[in-house]
Image: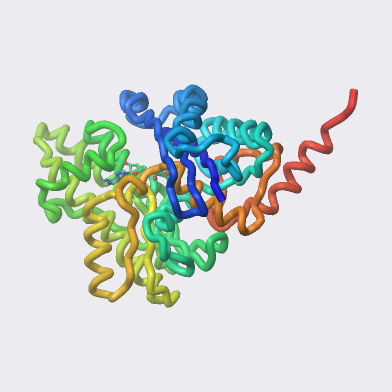
Amino acid sequence: MTILAIETSCDETAVAVVRNGRDILSSDLFSQADMHAMYGGVVPEIASRNHAVALGRLVELALKNAQISKNDLDAIAVTAAPGLIGALLVGVNFAKGLAFALGLPLIPVHHLRGHIAANYIAYPDLNPPFLSLVISGGNSLIADVQGYTDIRIIGRSRDDAAGECFDKTARVLGLGYPGGPILDKLAETGDDMAFNLPSPKIENHPYDMSFSGLKTAIVNIVHNAEQKGETLDTASLSASFARTVSEILVPRVFAAAKELGHHTIVVAGGVAANSRIRADFIKTAKEENKTLLIPPLNLCGDNAAMIGAQAFYEYKGGVIAGTELDARATMEVSENFTHMRNYYEFRTSTRTHRI
Ligand code: KG4
């Protein structure tokens, strides 16, 4: 089954052609990061407009690079939730038009399920069940993946996402956007024990996380240094920050895997590109004799191949949308799109009249 997948949930416009959920025939991406950098973060309006501009050309490019024609496609997939609503709507409406014009099924995909599915591409033998940690710009959660479309949340951030915390830290240090890769590079020359940063626990919820205190601590350190006219050792602050984020994530994930009896741990999302976090996961997996899977760097961040991969399993599970499909800014990764169709149809049919 050959699926053309569209991803526009944030500031990357991406289109891919994926066969049978595992083989990438093409994967093309237009990054807007430099357009948002001058604002220190993603500006939703700018993101939506650029998706509208880039999408048509990217679809043509993805077909060309896959060396197929649109008539060879079996379905169109699109990220329909969660994300910036205007940005999602551009992709959803484009996908609807394409599916309608080609007479193909339309498959809505949850963005975070896509991040998990990046590992199906990277590791062809991977099948559920497994435990997954998703660490992206907008979400941080630990999930029990019982089946391709049977996902339960075990723990989550109560406030900021890990990626958001990296971006805000870089911003307060005046380092630019996106902050993750910049801090990662800077940390290479720093002393990771130089700063003692908070790593809070949530009472009675051992797998939940909190990153907002960490962010506030960094803001206070920066402001204190500014007030005293001191030069901050940003390399050591970056290294200490990455260590602290890793210390929040790693023990929770391995404890959850132990409690749920999972041997395989799958890490996913943009922050999975972080070298300190990757190294700590690899080291702990060896010590605890677990199988650890993390995608290669090109599959950690947003891309459409991961959406095409998950779409294959959504389709097999009966998820098909019609032209009534809506985008959703928020949606739990555990929720399925199947029950939404009746709701959307009801919403439109009760207000549609012949005049
Ligand atoms: O998964 P992603 O591309 O987008 C979302 O779905 O949110 O994640 C983007 C996030 C950004 O916050 C970015 O700063 C972070 O991933 N990131 C990193 C690294 N590369 C990207 N964070 C830490 N270290 C990195 N090397």
> Total number of numbered labels?
0
Q: Is residue 90 above or below residue 310?
A: above
User: Eyeballing the image, is 40 above or below 306?
Assistant: above
Q: Position of residue 3 (x, y in %)?
A: 54, 45
Nearer to the camera, 198 or 248: 248
Q: Residue at x 38, y 58 (%)?
A: 209
Q: Which image quarter: residue 76?
A: top right
Nearer the observer, 132 or 98: 98
In percent of the image, x 71 and y 47: which residue is there?
341
| Residue at the right extreme of this rendering | 355
Q: In which quarter of the image is ligand 1?
A: top left
Instruction: Note whether residue 233 is visible.
Output: yes
Q: Which residue is drawn at 30% across and 33% down?
A: 177
Q: Quadrant of the C terminus?
A: top right
Q: In which quarter of the image is residue 72?
A: top right
Residue 176 position within the rendered picture, expressed as x and y whole percent measured from the top left? 26, 31
Q: Is 343 located above or below residue 336 in the figure?
A: above
Quadrant of residue 169 within the rendered picture: top left
In the image: residue 283, left or right of residue 136:
left
Q: Residue at x 40, y 62 (%)?
A: 202
> Could you tell me residue 29's position as x and y percent?
40, 34
The reply, left or right, for residue 181 in relation to residue 91 is: left
Q: Which colour scheme is used?
A: rainbow
- Can residue 158 be seen? no
Nearest the eye: 14 or 83: 14
Q: Where is residue 218 in the image (x, y as percent from the top left)?
A: 24, 44
